[in-house]
């Protein structure tokens, strides 16, 4: 993966500051430039009073620009030689401003902090980070406030479903591993749930229908890994568990203390997507580790 331009949206929160730190480390590793953006949304300004407040607005933006530079200086490792730009962007909402900037400037990677909110507001609206993950035209790395930054990713987990997207994620993990990873873990979660209509037949799990599904999954893992030559350069560990996919992935991340999850998503939209969420989005809420999300049509792929 070639990261030459990394964008980091910030709201000056501790989580966003952590995202900036991670972006700077990656930028130093890949000799990339970093653009830190701050979104000014329309509801913050009174349209009826703009004519008499242009000077005040300009002063306000200058203050934000000054704050951006100050925070960057605090976040920067003086030993890292990274070119950093700061931009104030505007839009109807933070997600729309960020996505418009990404579509216009086509960076190679977005690094964004996620606050891990939950509850009704999150269920209905989603977080800024999740909307960026859902619609960004490039790979997105989400980090939590507690995510460890400033180092390589020794242990990488790649959840697979044996689709073309799994190969995309495996290739990305293999390339990232060149920076100093020790292990890549291929993980497949067998979703045990079956249609309730099968309960009357004594089938309460997919394991009742296909008893050797775990063995078959292990064979498919070998076949998938064989398609990515770069995996031969690191220790490859394969694991198959049964349960709710995102819960099993989250449990395994905690079990091995993984440093990064690399996952590819279909990038679906629509009512089902909005209400149910994807495995990726549930993972973003469930784990405290960085997650690199890829899509088939991403620029860097």
Image (cartoon, rainbow, N blue to C red):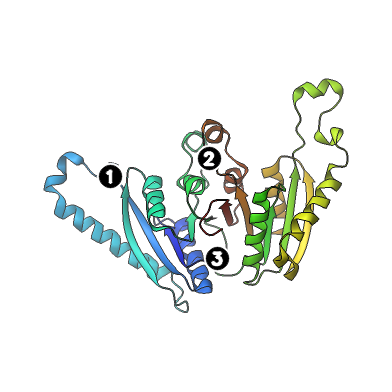
Rounded to the nearest angstrom, the CA distance separating label 1 from label 3 is 32 Å
The answer to whether residue 259 is above or below residue 214 is below
Residue picked out by circle 2: 118
Q: Which mark is residue 149?
A: 3
- Can residue 258 be seen from the camera position used here? no
Query: What separation in Å lies between label 3 and label 2 (alpha carbons)?
Result: 24 Å
In the displayed structure image, the side of residue 240 where residue 22 appears, left or right? left
Determine which residue is flagged by label 1.
44
Name which residue lies at 56% across and 50% down.
295
Q: Are marks 1 and 3 in contact (CB under 8 Å)?
A: no
Write the residue at 54% across / 51% down: 297
Q: At x 43% / y 58%, what residue is drawn?
A: 106
The answer to whether one can see residue 21 in this image is: yes
Tally the numbered discs: 3
- Residue 72 screen position, x and y as percent: 39, 67
**3D distance between C-alphas at marks 1 and 2:** 25 Å
Image position, residue 134 (x, y; %):
51, 45
- Vertically, is 293 above or below 47? below
């Amino acid at each position: 993966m070639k990261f030459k331009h990394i964008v980091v949206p910030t709201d000056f929160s501790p989580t966003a500051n952590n995202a900036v730190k991670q972006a700077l480390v990656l930028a130093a590793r890949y000799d990339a430039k970093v653009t830190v953006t701050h979104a000014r949304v329309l509801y913050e300004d009174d349209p009826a009073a703009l004519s008499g407040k242009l000077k005040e607005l300009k002063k306000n933006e200058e203050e934000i620009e000054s704050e951006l530079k100050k925070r960057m200086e605090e976040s920067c490792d003086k030993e890292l030689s990274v070119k950093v730009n700061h931009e104030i962007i505007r839009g109807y909402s933070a997600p729309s401003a960020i996505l418009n900037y990404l579509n216009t400037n086509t960076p190679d990677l977005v690094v964004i902090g996620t606050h891990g909110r939950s509850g009704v507001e999150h269920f209905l609206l989603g977080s800024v980070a999740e909307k960026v993950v859902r619609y960004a035209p490039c790979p997105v790395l989400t980090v939590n406030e507690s995510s460890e930054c400033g180092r390589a990713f020794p242990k990488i987990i790649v959840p697979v479903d044996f689709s073309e997207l799994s190969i995309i994620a495996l290739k990305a993990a293999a390339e990232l591993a060149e920076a100093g990873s020790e292990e890549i873990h291929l993980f497949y979660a067998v979703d045990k749930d079956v249609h309730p209509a099968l309960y009357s037949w004594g089938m309460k799990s997919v394991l009742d229908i296909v008893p050797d599904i775990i063995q078959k999954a292990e064979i498919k893992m070998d076949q998938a890994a064989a398609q990515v030559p770069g995996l031969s350069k690191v220790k490859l560990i394969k694991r198959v568990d049964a349960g709710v996919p995102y819960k099993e992935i989250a449990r395994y991340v905690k079990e091995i203390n993984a440093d990064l999850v690399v996952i590819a998503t279909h990038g679906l939209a629509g009512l089902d997507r909005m209400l149910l969420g994807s495995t990726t989005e549930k993972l973003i809420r469930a784990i405290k580790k960085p997650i690199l999300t890829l899509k088939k049509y991403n620029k860097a792929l």
